[in-house]
Amino acid sequence: MGEFPPLAALGPRVMICGPSNSGKSTLAVALAAKLGCEAFHVDLFRHLPDTDWVQRPDAEFAALHDAAIQEERWVMDGNYSTLMPQRFARATGIILLGDSRWANFARYVRRTLFQKRSRPGSLAGDKDSIKWEMIRWILLVQPPMREQNRQRLKAAGLPMLELNSMHELARLYEAWGLKL
């Protein structure tokens, strides 16, 4: 295994962060299956089911998030910096994913237009559509925030693993014996 720490080094409550369409939700499901715990997707707390990503009221969103982090064991994917202080207080490890903005954009288009089945982290009802706001987020807003986000996660003082490409992520799946 060598280049990756053992999965146990991240403890029983693992946060997975990174840009949109970098593989966070799929990894959360694979890790949760390996660890025998629940995978939580912060996007599903934020957005109402059976909609095209309509947001819940802030108080309801925070209540769902805060209830989930009280569980004894979990894997949780998503960012939402306003709720990170609570998550940091309960998490025992962090995985930060990354890839190029163009790769993330290509995955967004592919999953939104061509995916015919539900995917990890998708809203119930699968009513997703291409949104200019999301394209702008992926290509223009997120990339310059990468270093700031990395520093915020490191400052939490938790064990942290950073992966910078889908190739590295694939090697992690193999090293930890994760299944898609």
Image: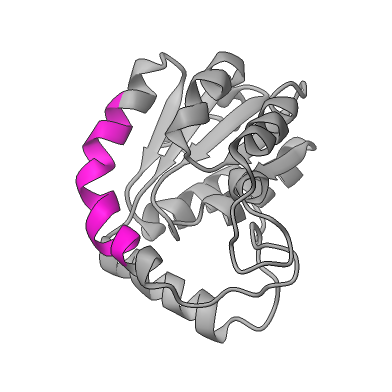
Q: x and y percent of residue 90 in the render?
A: 61, 17
Q: Is residue 80 left or right of residue 7?
A: left
- How many numbered circles are shown? 0
Q: Is residue 61 above or below residue 159?
A: below
Res. 177 in view: no
Q: x and y percent of residue 89 in the render?
A: 56, 14
Q: Is residue 74 above or below residue 27?
A: above
* Residue at the left extreme, as displayed: 144
Q: The C terminus lies in which quarter of the figure?
A: bottom right
Q: Is residue 138 magenta?
A: yes
The segment highlighted magenta reads 136-151
| Display colour scheme | one colour
Name the residue: 27% across, 60% down.
Answer: 100
Q: Is residue 177 magenta?
A: no
Q: Is residue 47 above or below residue 90?
A: below
In the picture, residue 8 is in which quadrant?
top right
Q: x and y percent of residue 62 in the render?
A: 63, 31
Q: Is residue 5 left or right of residue 66?
A: left
